[in-house]
Structure formats: structure tokens, C-alpha cells
Image (cartoon, helix red, strand yellow):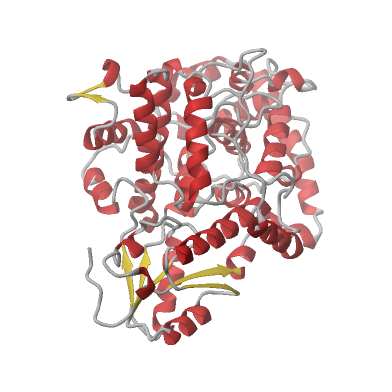
């Protein structure tokens, strides 16, 4: 811990740092709270910087206001400001309290760090940035692990995390004798299965005030405000965690990849918004799940499958972001894809039932689970040839749990393979057969998931095979693409020509519609 300076010091808390033990607050924990001025700034510039989902604006600002209230109740002198940007409120606050230093936990997003560096020279006192403690692995620990490795595989990292933090371990071996129960966790939806309703919270006066503000000033943004029920305090987020463990976790594992029309949440935890805001920490979430497993009633594949998402996937994405983003990672475009984002990503107006259901769900909640994001949205964008940066920008806009650190590696790397294999060993490209297997979407669709060409052919099939034909030379060196490319090579030349012609014809009307867009909608492309 860094010792306080001789003069008064203040703590600046960002919107995704809402935990009482976040590093900047913790670094001054030896002082009485009434000696630690705190500031939180509700930035209108941030809100207007992109087409944020309306529910994300409500969640972030309501959580900030509730956290400020909680700090006041603990005795901290809190300044809460609604302003266009950060500079002027910080200057006024620092002068008012005659601060000798401002302490800030390092922002998780690199663009925010860059913005803050530009502010340094405008502040009346030094700015001390402390390490972000909302992750299990520090940046340095991940870089030390990654440096010198020939491959950076998620599975390798996940196993190291299990050993390092002693999670689901039996001495030096994993509990149950296996590291990964993914094979047991790929069940399609079960007809007649009943899913628990998510735990929601009626908006209190603070949240209602934020909803009114967003409706008035940001009602043109994407998404609906109806039915907002997300947790906005740490106490509520802990209730969601407890509800997940008791009501959803026992069945989470087998059906974590399933998709079902009319079911927005299935057995998913809905914890990512709270982890990414700092209302919950990864350590306490993992500990709660592991303890529930040891108490009994939670199958090991469910406990392991969920812990892998936090200890493996989430920590890996953040570490990979820190390791690769300074090298221009965000601009990668391995396949050279340049098509613009179709308008139906915003409107939801498409005949493809899988996309229609997913996009409508996102409009209503700002949420879709990981398979919808990877195998419906990203898969379609990949095989269609949409520019990776346009897709990543859209993901950041529409999801309630989106931040730069999580979306860049997930969309550019995992979803679109735009990094050429730095993050995964093959593209997550699939035909409609995957969606038919893992969902009931195809039953509600006018297209036939078994046909590649023809009026009833599912566009995902046509675009999938067209993608393989267009990008064969880049896909051939990838060992895991061997068998599908053998199948492609055996395809009759006439069928290949039909696929390519139908794929081109399918895209052209979309391009025409985009060209005719009115200027008032051009900002929605977020390219």
C-alpha cells in the first residue's frame, strides 16, 4: 500500500470502479473516511460519444449515484457532478479541498487512460494512478505468463489459473480428474423445460430520476427503457449472485450453449454487468460458486463450466487486451473484410429467425448470452464479410456489459478471427446446422437450414460456403480447417458457382438500402 502524502488527498472514482475496496480507496484506508474527499463525475461527453444502449446509461449512472450515496453514509465527503467532461469538475474539486494529490485506480480501458493522460497538465495537483484490483491477474502477471510462449491458448491459461488460485483442485490435480467438462455442457434446449425468472429490482427514486434523464436527453439512442430491472447496488448484485447459485447454477452447465425462442436468459447468471462495473469481484463470485459445489447439489460440470467463464475466459480476455492492444490490435483485419454493418443490426428487421430473436432481445435488455454473441451475431458478421471494426463498435454500443477491454479481443479475435489466429486456432464460422442443433430458432424461420442454394436456402448456409470459397487460401494453413476444406474441394463446380452468385445477390439489396440511408441515421453505423 502506498502511504498517504503529508497534505490532503482525494480519490477520483470512475463509473466502472464501484467497489468499496477498489485500489484508490483502499490505499487511503488507514485514514478516517471524513479525511478522504471523493469525486464521481457523470460525463455527458461519454454518454454522447457513441450510441450506448439506453439501459446501459441508466445502469451506469444509477449505480454511480447509489455508490456515491453509500460512500456518504460511510462518512466520505463525496462530490457528485453532472458535467460535459472531467476537466473542469476535477479542477474545481481539487482547489476546493486544497488537495496535494488525486488518487485514481487505473482505468480498465486504454482509450480512457489516454484521455486521462491528456488531463494531467490541467490539474492543480499530481495524479497518482494505482493498479486496478478488479481482476485476479495483474497486467504484469499476465505478461510474465505470456512472454516467450509459442502459443497463447485459453486452456493453458485457465489451467494455470486453477493451480495458481487453488480453484476446484485436489492437491496438484483438478477435482474429478479433468480440467474441462465442456463436452458435457453442449445440450440443445429441452422441449417443455422451465427456466427460473431472473431476479429484478423495481427502480427506486434514484433510478427513476436517471431513467427520466436518459429518456429526455438520450431517447434517440438504441434500445428500450421499458422493464428496466437491473441491480444498481452492490447489495442487489450480491442477491443476484445468490439467486443464480440456488436457482440457475445447478442446470447452467449442460444448457449454457442452448438458445430458445422466447427465452432470453435460460440458466445464465446475468452477472457480467456487475462484474464489469465493480459491484462484484471475480474472486467473490468464484468463491461463492466453489463453496456451493462443495456444499452439494451443484454438479461439477456446472460449477467448472461457470468458473471457467470467469477464471478462464474473462481474465484471459483482459490479459490478452493488455498484452496486444498497444500493438495496434484493434485495427486487425485478417480477411480484409470491408462490407458495412447491415441496417437490420439496428432495426431487427430480418427474416432470419436466429438473428431476429437475438436482436430483439438485445433491444429489450442490452443482453444476449455468449453463444448468441459468438455463433449467431459474430458468425453472421464473419461469413458475410463485414468490417471487423464496424462489428466491434456495434457490440460496444448495444450491450449493457460492454467495455473496450472485453469487446476488442472478443469481437476482433474470438468472434471474427480478424487477428489471424493470435487468440484462437480457427475461425468460429458455422453453417445453419449449428444453430439448428443448438436452438429451436429454425422451427420459427421461413428458411430451410438444410439448403445451400435456392429460394428457401438459409442465408447463413449460402454465406458460410461463400466465405470458405472466398477465403480458402487464408484458411488452408489452419490445421483445424482441413476437413471442411476437403468437403469444399469435393463440391461440384456448378454448385460453387450457384453459392457465390446467390451470396452476391443476397448482399446487393442490403448495400442499396445502406446507400439510401438518410443522414440522420448515419451515426448509427458507428464505424
Q: Is residue 249 left or right of residue 146?
A: right
Determine the residue positioned at 61% across, 31% down.
Answer: 265
Q: Quadrant of residue 455?
A: top right
Residue 89 in the image: state x and y as whole percent.
Answer: 52, 79
257 vs 6: above or below: above
For the C terminus, give its image quadrant. bottom right
Residue 263 in the image: state x and y as whole percent.
Answer: 67, 27
Q: Is residue 218 left or right of residue 34?
A: right
Asked if residue 10 can be seen in this view, the reply is no
Q: Is residue 166 left or right of residue 518?
A: left
Residue 41 in the image: state x and y as whole percent.
Answer: 53, 70
Q: Nearer the viewer, residue 39 or 276?
A: 39
Q: Nearer the viewer, residue 236 or 81?
A: 236
Determine the residue positioned at 41% across, 74% down.
Answer: 37
For the N terminus, give its image quadrant. bottom left
430 vs 314: above or below: above
Q: Nearer the viewer, residue 421 or 504?
A: 421
485 vs 11: above or below: above
Determine the residue positioned at 40% across, 73% down.
Answer: 117
Residue 152 in the image: state x and y as whole percent.
Answer: 31, 38
Amino acid at each position: 500500500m502506498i502511504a498517504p502524502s503529508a497534505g490532503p488527498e482525494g480519490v477520483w472514482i470512475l463509473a466502472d470502479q464501484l467497489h468499496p475496496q477498489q485500489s484508490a480507496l483502499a490505499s487511503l484506508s488507514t485514514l478516517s473516511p471524513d479525511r478522504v474527499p471523493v469525486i464521481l463525475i457523470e460525463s455527458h461527453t461519454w454518454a454522447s460519444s457513441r450510441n450506448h444502449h439506453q439501459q446501459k446509461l441508466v445502469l451506469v449512472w444509477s449505480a454511480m449515484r447509489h455508490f456515491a450515496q453509500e460512500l456518504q453514509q460511510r462518512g466520505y465527503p463525496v462530490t457528485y457532478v453532472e458535467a460535459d467532461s472531467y476537466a473542469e469538475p476535477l479542477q474545481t474539486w481539487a482547489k476546493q479541498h486544497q488537495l496535494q494529490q488525486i488518487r485514481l485506480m487505473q482505468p480498465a480501458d486504454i482509450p480512457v487512460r489516454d484521455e486521462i493522460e491528456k488531463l494531467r497538465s490541467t490539474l492543480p495537483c499530481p495524479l497518482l494512478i494505482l493498479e486496478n484490483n478488479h481482476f485476479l491477474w495483474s497486467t504484469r502477471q499476465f505478461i510474465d505468463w505470456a512472454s516467450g510462449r509459442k502459443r497463447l491458448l485459453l486452456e493453458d491459461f485457465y489451467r494455470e489459473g486453477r493451480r495458481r488460485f487453488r480453484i476446484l483442485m485436489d492437491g496438484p490435480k483438478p477435482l474429478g480428474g479433468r480440467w474441462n467438462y465442456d463436452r458435457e455442457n453442449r445440450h440443445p434446449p429441452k422441449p417443455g423445460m422451465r427456466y427460473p425468472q431472473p431476479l429484478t429490482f423495481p427502480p427506486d427514486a434514484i433510478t427513476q430520476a436517471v431513467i427520466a434523464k436518459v429518456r429526455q436527453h438520450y431517447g434517440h439512442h438504441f434500445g428500450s427503457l421499458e422493464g428496466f430491472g437491473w441491480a444498481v447496488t452492490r447489495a442487489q448484485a450480491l442477491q443476484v449472485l445468490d439467486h443464480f447459485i440456488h436457482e440457475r447454477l445447478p442446470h447452467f452447465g449442460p444448457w449454457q450453449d442452448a438458445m430458445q425462442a422466447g427465452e432470453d436468459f435460460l440458466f445464465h447468471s446475468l452477472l457480467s454487468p456487475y462484474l464489469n462495473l465493480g459491484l462484484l469481484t471475480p474472486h467473490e463470485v468464484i468463491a461463492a460458486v466453489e463453496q456451493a459445489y462443495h456444499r452439494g447439489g451443484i454438479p461439477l460440470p456446472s460449477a467448472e463450466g461457470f468458473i471457467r467463464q470467469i477464471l478462464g475466459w474473462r481474465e484471459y480476455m483482459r490479459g490478452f487486451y493488455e498484452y496486444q492492444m498497444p500493438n495496434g490490435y484493434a485495427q486487425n483485419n485478417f480477411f480484409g473484410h470491408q462490407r458495412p454493418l447491415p441496417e437490420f443490426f439496428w432495426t431487427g428487421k430480418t427474416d432470419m429467425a436466429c438473428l431476429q430473436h437475438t436482436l430483439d432481445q438485445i433491444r429489450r435488455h442490452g443482453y444476449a448470452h455468449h453463444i448468441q454473441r459468438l455463433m449467431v451475431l459474430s458468425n453472421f458478421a464473419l461469413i458475410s464479410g463485414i468490417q471487423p471494426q464496424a462489428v466491434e463498435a456495434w457490440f460496444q454500443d448495444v450491450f449493457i456489459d460492454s467495455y473496450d477491454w472485453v469487446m476488442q479481443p472478443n469481437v476482433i479475435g474470438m468472434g471474427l478471427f480478424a487477428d489471424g489466429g493470435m487468440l484462437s486456432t480457427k475461425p468460429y464460422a458455422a453453417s445453419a446446422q449449428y444453430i439448428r442443433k443448438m436452438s429451436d430458432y429454425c422451427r420459427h424461420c421461413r428458411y430451410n437450414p438444410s439448403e445451400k442454394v435456392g429460394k428457401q436456402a438459409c442465408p447463413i448456409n449460402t454465406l458460410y460456403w461463400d466465405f470458405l470459397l472466398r477465403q480458402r487460401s487464408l484458411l488452408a494453413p489452419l490445421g483445424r480447417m482441413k476437413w471442411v476444406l476437403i468437403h469444399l474441394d469435393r463440391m461440384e463446380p456448378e454448385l460453387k458457382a450457384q453459392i457465390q452468385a446467390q451470396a452476391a445477390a443476397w448482399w446487393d439489396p442490403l448495400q442499396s438500402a445502406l446507400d439510401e440511408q438518410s443522414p440522420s441515421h448515419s451515426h448509427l453505423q458507428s464505424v
